[in-house]
Image: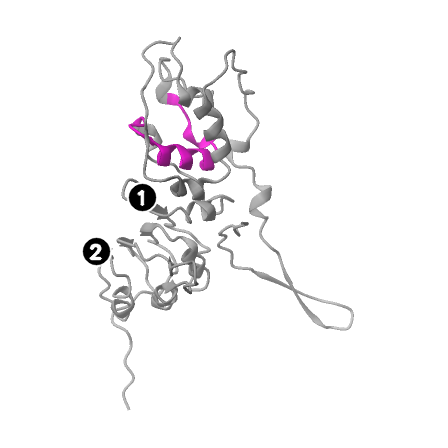
């Protein structure tokens, strides 16, 4: 299934005219996310060829990396990761990720952004006891695989949460905020110092919905139902009417700061 990348973009028009004095509006479209090469696709040192026959789990994980949203169908069983105690001992992480060398003195410099996010999503679902550096993965909002990661369901052993910072984002508006409805695992959202207003919050709140249940499929939630933390600092377009819409988010626990700007009243 193809997932459309999440792009915040506010088109700006350039006004011109032709010889007949006809006004022409020209819009410049954003560069397609697919043309922006992420770090895990950037040219780097080629993978080192393995000098041994790896175990079956190596090939299984390489195959599963194409389908991180289907790992949950394998059941609740998980594997326990055992870190190597010597350079000669096989390490599944080093085999899959040649740049990861846990026994090197420079292991702290390991850059997780060079790892395909789909492979990372498979590893954190399959293994228990992974090194702490694998617990958090940072990628841009427009990454092509982010919508795919948002479809990974939570289980009793695993839950993927998304923390998004859009502070000072000039293209976050009451219109573009609706693109965040695709972040089904969004737990914390920072929209401080942006032009987002009460109308934008209301549109995001209205995006909370349920899918239609079929004969062989149960209804699923769609939208940021799990939002718990919302940073609204210095959002001058937020007023006290926003409280009505904040109540729509059932798990929202922290709002910083609480809006105190009064909405205008019209009297006859």
Picture layout, residue 76 above or below residue 6:
above
For the image, the number of numbered tags is: 2
Q: Pick out the residue farthest to the bottom.
A: 268
Q: Main secondary structure of the magenta part?
A: helix
Q: Answer with left or right where residue 117 lies relative to residue 136.
A: right
Looking at the rendering, which quadrant does residue 43 occupy? Answer: top right
Q: Residue at x 41, y 35 (%)?
A: 122
Q: CA distance from mark 2 to mark 1?
A: 19 Å
Picture layout, residue 187 above or below residue 195:
above
**Depth check, front residue: 146 or 118:** 118
Residue under numbered circle 2: 253
Residue under numbered circle 1: 159
Give the x, y percent position of residue 89. Answer: 38, 11
Identify the magenta region: 109-131
Evaluate whether residue 97 shows in this view: no
Q: Residue at x 32, y 19 (%)?
A: 83
Q: Please tell me whether mark 1 sits on a helix, a strand or a loop.
A: loop
Q: Pick out the residue farthest to the front.
A: 215
Looking at the rendering, which quadrant does residue 90 occupy? Answer: top left
Q: Please tell me whether mark 2 sits on a helix, a strand or a loop.
A: loop
Picture layout, residue 175 above or below residue 114:
below
Quarter of the image with the C terminus is bottom left
Give the number of the mark in front: 2 or 1: 1
Give the x, y percent position of residue 163. Answer: 34, 46
Say whether disc 2 or disc 1 marks the residue closer to the N-terminus: 1
């Amino acid at each position: 299934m193809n997932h459309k990348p999440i792009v915040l973009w506010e088109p700006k028009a350039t006004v011109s005219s032709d010889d007949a004095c006809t006004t022409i509006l020209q819009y410049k479209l954003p560069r397609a996310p697919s043309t922006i090469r992420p770090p895990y696709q950037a040219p780097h040192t080629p993978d080192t060829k393995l000098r041994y026959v790896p175990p079956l789990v190596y090939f299984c994980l390489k195959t599963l990396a194409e389908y991180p949203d289907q790992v949950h169908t394998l059941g609740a069983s998980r594997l326990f990761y055992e870190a190597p105690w010597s350079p000669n001992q096989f390490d599944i992480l080093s085999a899959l990720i040649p740049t990861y060398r846990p026994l090197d003195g420079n292991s702290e410099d390991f850059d997780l952004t060079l790892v395909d996010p789909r492979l990372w999503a498979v590893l954190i679902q399959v293994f228990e006891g992974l090194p702490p550096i694998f617990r958090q993965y940072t990628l841009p909002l427009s990454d092509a695989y982010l919508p795919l990661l948002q479809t990974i369901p939570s289980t009793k052993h695993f839950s993927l949460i998304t923390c998004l910072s859009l502070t000072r984002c000039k293209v976050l508006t009451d219109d573009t905020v609706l693109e965040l409805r695709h972040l089904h695992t969004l737990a914390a959202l920072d929209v401080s110092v942006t032009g987002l207003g009460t109308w934008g919050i209301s549109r995001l709140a209205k995006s909370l919905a349920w899918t239609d249940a079929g004969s062989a499929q149960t209804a699923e939630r769609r939208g940021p139902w799990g939002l718990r933390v919302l940073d609204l600092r210095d959002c001058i377009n937020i007023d006290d009417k926003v409280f009505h819409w904040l109540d729509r988010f059932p798990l929202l626990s922290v709002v910083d700061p609480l809006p105190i700007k009064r909405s205008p009243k019209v009297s006859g």
